[in-house]
Image (tube, helix red, strand yellow):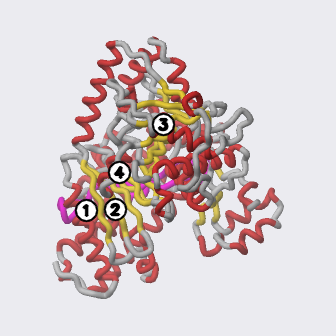
Amino acid sequence: MGFAFFFSPLRLPIPKLEDTVRRYLNAQKPLLDDDQFRKTEELGRSFEHGIGRELHEQLVAQDKQNKHTSYISGPWFDMYLSSRDSVVLNFNPFMSFNPDPKAEYNDQLTRATNMTVSAMRFLKTLRAGCLEPEVFHLNPDKSDTQTFRRLIRFVPSSLSWFGAYMVNAYPLDMSQYFRLFNSTRLPKLSRDELFTDEKAKHLLVLRNGNFYVFDVLDRDGNIVKPSEIQAHLKYILSDNSPAPAFPLAYLPSENRDIWALLRQKLLDNGNEEVLQKVDSAVFCLCLDDFPIKDLVHLSHTMLHGDGINRWYDKSFNLILTKDGNAAIHFEHSWGDGVAVLRFQNEVFKDSTQKPAVTPQSQPAAVDSSSAVQKLSFRLNDALKAGITKAKQNFDATMETLTLDFIQFKKGGKEFLKQKKISPDAVAQLSFQMAFLRQYGQTVATYESCSTAAFKHGRTETIRPASIYTKKCTEAFVRQPSKHSTEELQQMIAECSKYHSQLTKEAAMGQGFDRHLFSLRYLAASKGIPLPDIYQDQTYAQLNHNILSTSTLSSPAVNMGGFAPVVPDGFGVGYGVHDDWIGCSASSYPARNVHEFLQCVHKSLDDIFHVLEGKHISS
């Protein structure tokens, strides 16, 4: 039992106001001309010495009163739950699993059974309090070692956290995990609610737009025999019922207020019991009846699907296609990628290393027709009209989304680390370079960073567009022949160093975005007029994130993706692997994602070329 059990994570720090203003201005600098920057700087300084100071002091006082949580947690839940936009594309991302290394285990029924059993094993470990917290290592060479783990065992528990912090190892906050299971976001007028019912023992299965439930835990809370789960899933897969004429699953893809009103109509029309089953189910397993053609098809399937075979409000949907391709699609308000990725890693590892059934296993001889309940919904004309409208909106929106994917095969993490360059900095530099090559400018860029090293931490923003990336991208794109290879290498090194600093600051709760967000939220909640800094055009421009980016790499994950956060933006999910770099991106008609990814590939080519000591030609 590792040291991690003794921890209560440290509280998320509120940065100093002067640091926040300085970081804010640093992020603005590459986006503005001199006149704009001077004006923004004046607004920043007057905020720092005026109303910003008062708000900051109130925020600090409020935080001292609320030691059980973090200063960002409440406002952040509010931001998600008060948004009236559809959760599909606007919020819900996906992460797809790598295939099972043993090919025959990728059969849909076998893999669905194994993943369901592994998910339930994870649930049991979590609820028994035996799931060790993950540890975030700021300096992995020193703390991510057996020696450190052995040593820390002998330290009294009251001091063990001190030993970990000494070597910059932070146990991650696990407060989000209880919403992973039996949880759903419920639509309500003006602000949604999160609902969790840990007593429910059934799984929700969607296939061809039909809803099924059966118990995966028995009366004593033990996992139902894998052969029985397999039998029930086989029964569902052999049901030839057509898709319903009015598929209910379109409703959670609607605007939240419209969905809230329709949900009330569903309740009034006698659907309370079936909705309760949907909302309280352990999770939603989606069985799709087609194989995956390629990575673009995979992305569309897992990010939004056809609208009839997902329940987008569920904390997560585990999706399995006909050929055993699997992914997690999750609702974002309750938690962030860190909790979902941990779950995904454990499920992948457990289902591939300790599979509950084999392709040769026979399903149990049980009466699935009585164990599996098919849910039916009572629909009146108003509900049918609502579903029809939701389908039209869904189809029209999905038609506007383009997804594409590239793999850069000339190198990855290993090569970059040999060159002492941050792999993440290089990926981000390639996006800056690509955008400059395609559109001739530097734009607001967002990279998410977890602050789970702190109690109730959520995320912070890394701002990858900097004066360093601007100088470097302009040298590469506009005038490569003017600079020697050594000069270009030096510029890449500067970008890497600054990006690593920004990443460390963000992970330690020392970004500026969440602090400014909280001060603005506080002003609004106290009825204080919106301070000038927030009314400035350049503040809006910085928060209009044209490049929205997120990275994850894990042995379990093949790729992840999400939609752009603004109509004229790109959503960029990427992973830097040992010897290759993968990047999936999305756009609406205002941007050309295929061209953007070609520019990313060309940029990576140029960067690697220079790092190898070769000249690049314009």
Q: What residue type is labelled 4?
A: Pro
Q: Which amino acid does label 1 sit on?
A: Leu
Residue 236's disc is: 3
Instruction: Kindly identify which residue carries mark 2.
Output: 583
Count of number-bearing discs: 4
Q: Looking at the image, do the residues carrying marks 3 and 4 touch, with CB atoms under 8 Å apart? A: no
Residue at point 23% right, 86% down? 615
- What element does badge 1 sit on? helix
Local crowd size for mark 4, using a 10 Å CA cut-off: few (<14), some (14–19), many (≥20): some
Q: How far apart are marks 3 and 2 (CA)?
A: 36 Å
* Magenta range: 435-463
* Viewer can see residue 302: yes
Based on the picture, tell me whether residue 452 belongs to the magenta stretch.
yes
Q: In terms of depth relative to the viewer, which is nearer, 572 or 381?
A: 381
> Which label's residue is closer to the chain start, 3 or 4?
3
Q: In terms of depth relative to the viewer, which is nearer, 536 or 258?
A: 258
Q: Which amino acid does label 2 sit on?
A: Cys
* Viewer can see residue 43: no
Q: Is residue 400 above or below residue 209?
A: below
Q: The N terminus appears in which quarter of the rendering?
A: bottom right
Specify the quadrant of the image occupied by residue 196: top right
Q: Where is residue 337 in the image (x, y as percent from the top left)?
A: 49, 51
Q: Distance between the residues labelled 4 and 2?
A: 22 Å
In the image, taking residue 485 as reference, residue 336 lies left or right, namely right
Q: Position of residue 408 (x, y in %)?
A: 32, 71
Instruction: Kindly identify which residue carries mark 1.
Output: 597
Q: How far apart are marks 1 and 3 (CA)?
A: 40 Å
Instruction: Kindly identify which residue carries mark 4.
Output: 291
> Which label's residue is closer to the chain start, 1 or 4?
4
In the image, taking residue 146 as reference, residue 494 lies left or right, namely left
Q: Which amino acid does label 3 sit on?
A: Ile
